[in-house]
Amino acid sequence: MIALSCLWALMRSAPRQSIGRHFKQPDFSVTVKVGDLFAEQSDLIIGFTDVFDTSTEAGDIIAPRSVQAQFLDKVFSGDASALDAALEVALSGAAIRESESEVSKPRGKRDRYPLGTVAVVAKGANRYYCVAYSHMSNDLVARSSVDYLWQGLSSVWSAVASSGQLQPVAVPVLGSDLARVGSLGRESLIKMIILSFVASSRVSLISRKLTVVVHPSGADEVNLSEVQAFLGSL
């Protein structure tokens, strides 16, 4: 009995790695887990800037540790030209907001798309929703805000609803790293992503399952019990 009690105590005190909730009317679920976004068996949402840069060569346009760099490496085998071509096709119907000159922006892409633009890239059996939710300055600094992120989320849910056929979709904690959204921490960003998805799902069903994936390096910043309580309040 003592051994069982100790085991139970250890299990209760161990950090949680996954939480979730199933919603009814409409029928969908939300999961938040610690793990690898690219290990998910689902379509993925990938954050981009308004110029849809892809270069990781010097590390100052796209950081080698970013989700975008992993997307290039794991999905396109590091072939930036292939990713650029896929983005070009996906963006062919999108309006360019403005184009920078070579003088004003010597490095990186120069065509700017409206924030909230979504490029839907099909690769293999999966779709990748590349959403512009941050502004890339001419000095190569990505900047975002709560308004930009909310706009990007609203747009990406519409794209998933139109193209995803209710298939599961996974998203990283957008806005948590180099395009940090204001002073919001990872836990607040997760709640924002969930709130946006649930609110949109109650208007029109988007996907049967959303998974928010927290990278292990940021897991200490997230109290999954608090996120579970937030899910339960919705």
Image (cartoon, rainbow, N blue to C red):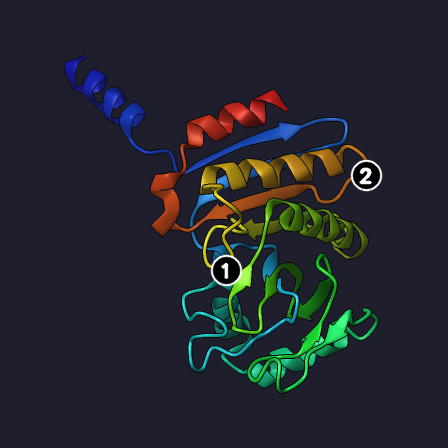
Real-space Cα separation, disc 2 to disc 1, in angstroms: 27 Å
Residue 177 position, x and y percent, is 45, 55
Residue behind mark 1: 38
Judge depth for marks 2 and 1 and give the one in front. 2
Q: Are marks 2 and 1 in contact (CB under 8 Å)?
A: no
The local crowd at label 2, few if under 14, some if 14 to 19, many if 20 or more residues have their Cα within 10 Å, is: few
Q: Name the residue rendered at 35%, 51% in the picture.
A: 217
Q: Residue furthest top?
A: 1
Q: Residue furthest left?
A: 2
Q: Name the residue rendered at 51%, 48% in the picture.
A: 173
Q: Amino acid at mark 2?
A: Ser
Residue 7 position, x and y percent, is 22, 23
Q: Nearer the viewer, residue 75 or 147?
A: 147
Q: Is residue 63 left or right of residue 134?
A: left
Residue 194 position, x and y percent, is 61, 37
Query: As displayed, is residue 142 above or below residue 211?
Result: below
Q: Name the residue rendered at 57%, 22% in the picture.
A: 232
Q: The N terminus lies in which quarter of the figure?
A: top left
Residue behind mark 2: 204
Q: The C terminus lies in which quarter of the figure?
A: top right
For label 1, the SS is: helix
The quarter of the picture where residue 51 lies is bottom right
Query: As displayed, is residue 134 above or below residue 223?
Result: below
Q: Amino acid at mark 1?
A: Phe
The quarter of the picture where residue 122 lies is bottom right
Q: Earlier in the sequence, mark 2 or mark 1?
A: 1
